[in-house]
Image (cartoon, grey):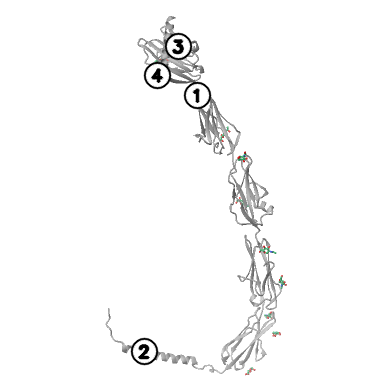
Amino acid sequence: MDFFFFFKSLLLLFSFMGCCVGELREVEAVLGKKVTLEHKFPMPDYVVLLWNFNDGSQSGNAVTSSVAGLQVNARFTGRLTLNTTSGFLTLGPLTAADSGDYTVSIVSVRGTQTEEMALRVLQPVSDVTVTANLPEAIEHNSTVVLTCTAKGSFLDFSWFKGAVPFVPDGKRVTLKKEGASSILTFAGVLRTDLAAPVYCQASNKLEKEKSAGFNLTVYYGPDQVTITPPKPAQFINSVANFSLTCSSSSRPAATFTWHHNQQQMDAGGPILTLKVIKDHNFGSQLAEYTCKAKNDKTNREVPSAAVSFAVIDALSSVKISGPTATLIAGDSAANLSCKAAAGAVTTVTWLKDGKPLAAAGRLAFFSNTTSMGINPVQKDDNGEYTCRFMNPINTVEASYKMVVNYGPEPAMVSGENAVEVKDLQVELECSAASVPPANFTWKFNGTMTAVKTSTYLIKMARYKNSGTYTCEAHNAVTGKNSSYTHVLSVKEEGALDEGLSDGAIAGIVIAVLVALGAAIALIVYCRQKVPVESPY
Ligand SMILES: *[C@@H]1O[C@H](CO)[C@@H](O)[C@H](O)[C@H]1NC(C)=O
Ligand SMILES: *[C@@H]1O[C@H](CO)[C@@H](O)[C@H](O)[C@H]1NC(C)=O
Ligand SMILES: *[C@@H]1O[C@H](CO)[C@@H](O)[C@H](O)[C@H]1NC(C)=O
Ligand SMILES: *[C@@H]1O[C@H](CO)[C@@H](O)[C@H](O)[C@H]1NC(C)=O
Ligand SMILES: *[C@@H]1O[C@H](CO)[C@@H](O)[C@H](O)[C@H]1NC(C)=O
Ligand SMILES: *[C@@H]1O[C@H](CO)[C@@H](O)[C@H](O)[C@H]1NC(C)=O
Ligand SMILES: *[C@@H]1O[C@H](CO)[C@@H](O)[C@H](O)[C@H]1NC(C)=O
Ligand SMILES: *[C@@H]1O[C@H](CO)[C@@H](O)[C@H](O)[C@H]1NC(C)=O
Ligand SMILES: *[C@@H]1O[C@H](CO)[C@@H](O)[C@H](O)[C@H]1NC(C)=O
């Protein structure tokens, strides 16, 4: 077949030329699929149309179309069709070996046109897988290396965190390509680095495929450990619903231990209740409490700030006891004593009638001021005594009314010294300070009367009522008496109507003189008065 030989030689020549003419066009196609290689020429009535190939190791004629018909290289049998009208070559299903340079030569009466193109048969992207160098990581400590591998040709890799493209900073997080894999390195991995699933995407010009979401547990913490309440009251009521709570962000969850003045307590868990503190017999003293959070994976232990407080029993039902015997001023001594049923006393205050008492003179405190004594008692000591017990939690108090018997003090009678006969309602009133109030008796001219009240009443005065009235005040409790003698004289009718008293006379004289003076002054003033023209 000289004819074919001629053309083959010709084509060989053309293919050499083709390589030097124009840009080499790349055609990409997927393994197993079909590809149509197209040339860019308007189709002339050709004499011969040839497609040559060169895969780097082998080269030759793929197909030839001429008057003699179609000649297909055995290598392509069954997988190659040539559209003799358009001159386009369709190849497929493609094998990896089909990659190579393809040159079309169209020989017509007007000359020969040649075009070369490169076919790249791409393996589809598959099996995109992310693997890590570690099954789990410790924040800050671990260097996590993620390797993405995939099958396919001409692969590019990109990484996603969740749906967001991942951008390495080039320092702590670096990315590099190694052969057909991509390596993402987190030096000193952070919990946030792998918080969302990481995806690797492998792609070539035709296809892209994402890996399954890759999760890696990054253990971290405990972070800052918080104790609540951060500033508890300095004193906590022992029956209060009080507890300390410790928390910290940690993965896995931290375990907590509690410490009393730096000593570990036999208590765990995030909550330390008052009951546990009391069970340790801590509390009554001001002490420091801290909690420590520990993460078994990261092996870190972090203490909280310290809080300090004391646990105090509230005071309850204070009782006051006082003297049971009768108190006589000047004779008796009195002790008052207070006791609370429960609770610790910090301060004791004593009050009398609401005012604070201080030790002085007859008054003294004993037993750490829970008792007081007055020796001897006096009348001024009568009153209400209060003991007030205080601690930081509460205040309780109790009162005792102290009665000091005294008197009667010197008696006193008030009433007229002289009355007129037939005067109605003459009253003599006797008084003497005394506790208990004094009983009274009256003597007239030294003779005991039947009157036993403080008031001696004469309904209508008679001459025989003149004389001495002695009031006697008695206090059976103190056994003391006091008396006062009042003299009353009964005069004839009108004897006490002395007309105007000296004072009244003096008053009238002064009034007359003042009136006279005023009259004289008025006259003088009027005489001196000269009419003056008004300036208005
Ligand atoms: C060959 O190409 C021509 C022109 O592009 C087109 O009209 C025709 O349908 C093609 N034939 C086949 C079998 O594809
Ligand atoms: C990764 O985590 C996500 C969400 O937590 C979960 O849906 C997915 O199944 C996990 N994947 C693996 C491989 O553990
Ligand atoms: C104690 O307080 C907590 C929280 O304030 C509450 O949930 C709990 O019921 C309280 N317990 C008692 C016995 O009052
Ligand atoms: C993490 O690193 C610190 C400091 O390098 C080290 O003390 C600690 O033991 C490490 N933790 C773990 C769990 O390896
Ligand atoms: C009062 O108490 C003091 C001190 O305890 C005691 O010496 C005194 O005898 C007591 N007096 C009375 C009257 O109880
Ligand atoms: C006396 O009271 C104080 C505080 O008020 C207390 O510290 C002290 O222990 C008490 N002493 C006695 C003997 O009760
Ligand atoms: C009482 O005594 C006064 C003077 O001592 C005397 O004047 C008067 O008569 C006496 N009255 C009686 C009722 O004895
Ligand atoms: C007053 O008299 C009554 C009756 O005799 C007696 O019970 C009482 O103690 C007396 N009071 C005084 C203060 O003496
Ligand atoms: C006080 O008076 C009463 C009743 O008159 C009498 O019994 C008593 O002896 C008197 N006491 C004194 C100290 O005088």
Disc 4 element: loop
Q: Are marks 2 and 1 in contact (CB under 8 Å)?
A: no
Badge 4: few (under 14), some or many (20 or more) residues near its Cα, within 10 Å?
Answer: few
Q: Which mark is residue 63?
A: 3
Q: How many marks?
A: 4
Q: Which of the two discs, 2 and 1, labels the residue nearer the N terminus?
A: 1
Chain-order first, disc 3 or disc 2: 3
**In the rendered view, does 7 fall on the left or right side of 376?**
left
Quadrant housing the N terminus: top left
Q: CA distance from mark 1 to mark 3?
A: 28 Å
Report which residue position mark 2 lands on: 521
Q: Nearer the viewer, mark 1 or mark 3?
A: 1
Quick one: SS at disc 1?
A: loop
How far separated are the C-alphas under marks 3 and 2? 162 Å
Say which element carries label 3: strand
The x and y percentages for residue 94 are 49, 17
**Label 2 environment density (alpha carbons within 10 Å; few <14, some 14–19, many ≥20):** few
Mark toward the viewer: 2 or 1: 1
Q: Nearer the viewer, residue 89 or 416?
A: 89
| Of marks 3 and 2, the one in the foreground | 3
Q: Earlier in the sequence, mark 4 or mark 3?
A: 4
Tell me how far mark 2 sits from mark 1, CA to CA.
139 Å
Task: Residue type at mark 4: give it.
Answer: Gly
Residue 22 tag number: 4
Whichever of labels 4 and 2 marks the residue nearer the N terminus, that label is 4
Q: Quadrant of residue 299?
A: top right
Q: Respond yes or no on whether mark 1 lies under 8 Å from ligand 2.
A: no
Is residue 270 visible in this depiction of the protein?
A: no
Do residues under tags 1 and 3 come within 8 Å of each other at their CB atoms?
no
Which quarter is ligand 8 in? bottom right
